[in-house]
């Protein structure tokens, strides 16, 4: 009785180490509320509010500082390399994967806020409610990535999704943005309902909400409800990730939202979903048949996504829509790693490839949409490919940075994207998915056409009357510095990043309970060679 009471108290009132590990989430939630209240008492609510912006920007610092401290000193502050802690009944996992995600989300949120502040169009949107929604969306992504069970995950998913629905239609006088927001809301709500139903069916089969207990789920034709539940959960996550054939909302939403917000949605949302799938697949499933079945599902999703993203991007002139299909293709590359993990849950190569490609893709996409936001300041939103003609002569620095980002997305060395895709292919080949690796390489060659067509417009076509002509003012100088740093980082991370990611401990924090309900320590989940630790 006393032990059960102590366990309940530990779940309700975790120790001080929990608050350090969860400081990024708490800072974003509190910062978002304070930024919203600052708009009530300071300034005109219909005009940009720099006080709210400063509060939001400062609130992101714990998301960068705390993960750096914990990743550089993994044996400190209550986090052990071999036994990472879990709190709130596995609702929060304090492992290095969590801190790695916090670091990416924190830097991405700071970049988005700063880019909005130094661009003319973005500054007009920088009102207290936008800062608050952005903080809440980032907090939701962090909650998802650090969750070790379904309820905490779904809480973070809905916090992120509801915030993004409003952000997409934030320009309320732009009919295209409102149309995109309605489509995003309808598709997102449908995906959430599918995920919820899948969670219910899985719980019906295993009687637990913990992801560590998914290893006991029987994935075979003899257990149809278990198969349907897991399949529905994967389909719902595929909607959120933008995987074909569940991608139809992507191009419209990318085109309708402001470029600064589009960069945020196209990267950080994927970060959260990818980490969720990484954790689930990393626990393994009972029997070899379950893993093989899941690998086939991801095999199909990867092929469809890369095919759709590579082919449909050829028929569009809108740069945003082309990047939307590029995002769909990149979702297929993540599915390649998921298929690898389904066959080999403990594969360090697959886990490291997912982490490396997540960081690389985030940097490349944020940099690309930052340049688009910069160019749209002097032209109009939703630039056409032909409007980039002559950019190499009119704005050589912007053209050079955009070239680096596009080459990275295309996977051409020495840009960072090449090394990320190489790690994905290497991990797939290591477990025997040679055919899928070949499909990925062949279909990637198709997407080179529309990537390189943008570079042809930039460097080989002469400027026309409709060509974009970036203004040279103080804001443009700030943008050049920011984009230049990101472009340099993409080159450096492409060479150094994979080695650093290889040093990250990919052991998952988890809890397992015996049939008597007691927490067991020092045991590993089936198919996982990592130890287990109880609530601290």
Image (cartoon, rainbow, N blue to C red):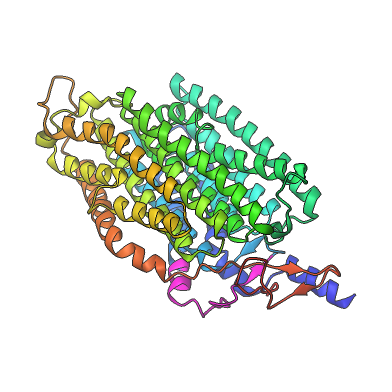
Q: Could you tell me residue 385's position as x and y percent? A: 25, 27
* In this picture, residue 190 sits left or right of residue 244: right
For the residue pair 385 and 208, the one nearer the viewer reads as 208
Point 68% across, 56% down: residue? 149
The N terminus: image quadrant: bottom right
Point 68% across, 36% down: residue? 193
Point 40% across, 68% down: residue? 502
Magenta span includes 338: no
* In this picture, residue 9 sits left or right of residue 49: right
Q: Could you tell me residue 60's position as x and y percent? A: 45, 57
Image height check: is 466 above or below 218? above
For the residue pair 522 and 68, the one nearer the viewer reads as 522
Q: Which residues are magenta?
A: 66-87
Q: Could you tell me residue 447's position as x and y percent? A: 31, 35
* In this picture, residue 155 sits left or right of residue 399: right
Q: Could you tell me residue 108's position as x and y percent? A: 41, 51
Point 39% across, 57% down: residue? 426
Q: Furthest residue to the bottom?
A: 75
Q: Quadrant of residue 82?
A: bottom right
The C terminus: image quadrant: bottom right
Tally of numbered tags: 0
For the residue pair 478 and 490, the one nearer the viewer reads as 490
Image height check: is 6 above or below 412? below
Q: Furthest residue to the right?
A: 1
Magenta span includes 79: yes
Q: Quadrant of residue 15?
A: bottom right
Q: Is residue 32 visible?
A: no
* In this picture, residue 274 sits left or right of residue 1: left
Q: Is residue 489 visible?
A: yes
């Amino acid at each position: 009785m006393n032990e059960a009471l102590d366990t309940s108290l530990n779940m309700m009132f975790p120790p001080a180490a929990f608050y350090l590990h969860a400081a990024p989430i708490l800072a974003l939630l509190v910062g978002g509320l304070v930024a919203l209240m600052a708009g009530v008492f300071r300034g005109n609510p219909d005009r940009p509010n720099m006080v709210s912006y400063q509060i939001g920007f400062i609130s992101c610092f714990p998301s960068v500082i705390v993960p750096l401290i914990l990743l550089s000193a993994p044996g400190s502050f209550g986090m052990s390399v071999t036994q990472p802690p879990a709190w709130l009944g596995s609702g929060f996992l304090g492992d290095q994967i969590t801190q790695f995600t916090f670091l990416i989300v924190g830097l991405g949120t700071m970049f988005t806020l700063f880019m909005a502040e130094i661009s003319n169009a973005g500054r007009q949107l920088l009102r207290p409610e936008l800062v608050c929604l952005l903080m809440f969306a980032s907090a939701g992504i962090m909650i998802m990535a650090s969750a070790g069970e379904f309820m905490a995950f779904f809480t973070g998913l809905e916090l992120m999704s509801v915030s993004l629905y409003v952000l997409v239609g934030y320009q309320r006088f732009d009919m295209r943005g409102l149309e995109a927001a309605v489509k995003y809301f309808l598709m997102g709500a449908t995906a959430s309902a599918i995920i919820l139903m899948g969670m219910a069916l899985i719980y019906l089969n295993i009687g637990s909400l913990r992801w560590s207990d998914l290893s006991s789920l029987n994935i075979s034709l003899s257990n149809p409800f278990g198969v349907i539940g897991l399949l529905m959960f994967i389909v719902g996550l595929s909607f959120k990730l933008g995987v074909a054939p569940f991608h139809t909302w992507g191009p419209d939403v990318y085109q309708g939202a402001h470029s600064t917000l589009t960069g945020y949605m196209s990267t950080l949302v994927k970060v959260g979903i990818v980490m969720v799938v990484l954790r689930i697949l990393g626990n393994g499933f009972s029997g070899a048949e379950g893993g093989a079945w899941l690998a086939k599902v991801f095999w199909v999703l990867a092929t469809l996504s890369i095919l759709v993203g590579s082919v449909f991007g050829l028929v569009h002139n809108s740069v945003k829509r082309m990047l939307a299909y590029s995002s769909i293709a990149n979702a297929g590359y993540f599915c390649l790693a998921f298929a690898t993990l389904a066959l080999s849950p403990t594969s360090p190569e697959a886990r490291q490839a997912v982490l490396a490609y997540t960081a690389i893709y985030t940097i490349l996409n944020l940099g690309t949409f930052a340049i688009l936001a910069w160019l749209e300041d002097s032209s109009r939103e939703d630039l056409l490919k032909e409007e980039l003609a002559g950019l190499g002569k009119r704005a050589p620095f912007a053209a050079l940075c955009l070239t680096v980002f596009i080459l990275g997305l295309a996977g051409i060395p020495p840009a960072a994207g090449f090394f990320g895709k190489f790690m994905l292919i290497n991990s797939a080949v290591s477990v025997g998915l040679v055919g899928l690796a070949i499909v990925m390489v062949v279909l990637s060659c198709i997407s080179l056409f529309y990537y390189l067509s943008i570079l042809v417009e930039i460097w080989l076509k002469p400027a026309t009357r409709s060509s974009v002509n970036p203004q040279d003012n103080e804001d443009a100088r700030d943008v050049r510095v920011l984009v230049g740093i990101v472009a340099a980082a993409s080159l450096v991370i492409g060479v150094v990043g994979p080695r650093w990611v290889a040093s990250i401990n990919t052991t998952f924090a988890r809890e397992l309970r015996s049939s008597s309900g007691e927490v067991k320590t020092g045991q590993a989940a089936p198919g996982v060679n990592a130890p287990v630790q109880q609530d601290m």
